[in-house]
Amino acid sequence: MSIYTPMSAQRLAAMSEKDPALRPASMPIRLYGIIRESIVDGPGLRFVVFVQGCPHRCPGCHNPESHDPAGGFETTTERIWDNLIKNPTLRGVTFSGGEPFLWAGELAEVGRCAAERGLDVMTYSGWTLEQLRAKAEKEEGVRALLSVTRYLVDGRFEQDKRDLSLRFRGSRNQHIWDLSAGFGENEAVLLDEAWSGGR
């Protein structure tokens, strides 16, 4: 089992200033919102980025205001990163929405920097892992985001399968995958049962 040791915000900032490669490329991105500290959007204390725009528009969605691609507000990946590294107690960053894979290339940049600093990346998607694998064959951004994602929660929210007892997901059709070994068919590990208990 790996032991997470947070790096100080001052050290992160200093590293980023000395080496531009340790910062994400500055890319415009449209967001629905940000939560700076959350314990309900993945394991441990997390910085949560909610992107704007979603093609799934699931009935009963927790964030229906995030569906309109023209809604929300525009910022940059660099600004997201600058806010993220201010907190030295974070275990990871979570990408939610909205549909994160609409902004796959942009989020992959933030995720790459987070992973390089020992933070784990959790990504939600209305597409299934199988569908994302197919998209990754044609879309480099999707491949890049899957590659930096440690935990993936996949599948649309289905209101008739809603289950409040589930950990980090809303309906029983959704699954949690560990992609630390890769996102291929023989690499992804299903975590539904392992993460069925308390936080």
Image (cartoon, rainbow, N blue to C red):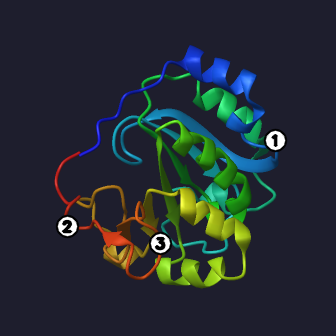
Could you tell whether 104 is left or right of 198 in the image? Answer: right
Could you tell whether 16 is left or right of 42 in the image? Answer: right
Label 1: element kind: loop
Residue 99 in sight here = no
Residue located 42% across and 76% down the image: 158
Q: Which of the numbered marks, if any, corresponds to residue 26?
A: 1
Number of marks drawn: 3
Pick the front one: 30 or 66: 30
Nearer the observer, disc 3 or disc 2? 3
Q: Earlier in the sequence, mark 3 or mark 2?
A: 3
Q: CA distance from mark 2 to mark 1?
A: 39 Å
Q: Which residue is mark 2?
A: 193
Q: Earlier in the sequence, mark 2 or mark 1?
A: 1
Label 3: element kind: loop
Label 2: element kind: loop
Residue 47 in sight here = yes
Q: Residues within 10 Å of mark 2 (few under 14, many from 20)?
A: few
Q: Residue flagged by tag 3: what amino acid is it?
A: Phe
Q: Quick one: which residue is furthest to the left in this view?
A: 197
Pick the front one: 62 or 46: 46
Q: Position of residue 171 (x, y in %)?
A: 35, 70
Residue located 47% across and 24% down the image: 7
Q: Which of the numbered marks, if any, corresponds to residue 183?
A: 3
The correct choice, above or below, for 116 with respect to 149 in the image is above
Q: Earlier in the sequence, mark 1 or mark 3?
A: 1
Q: Position of residue 40 (x, y in %)?
A: 37, 44
Q: Residues within 10 Å of mark 3 (few under 14, many from 20)?
A: many
Residue located 53% across and 72% down the image: 126
Pick the front one: 29 or 178: 178
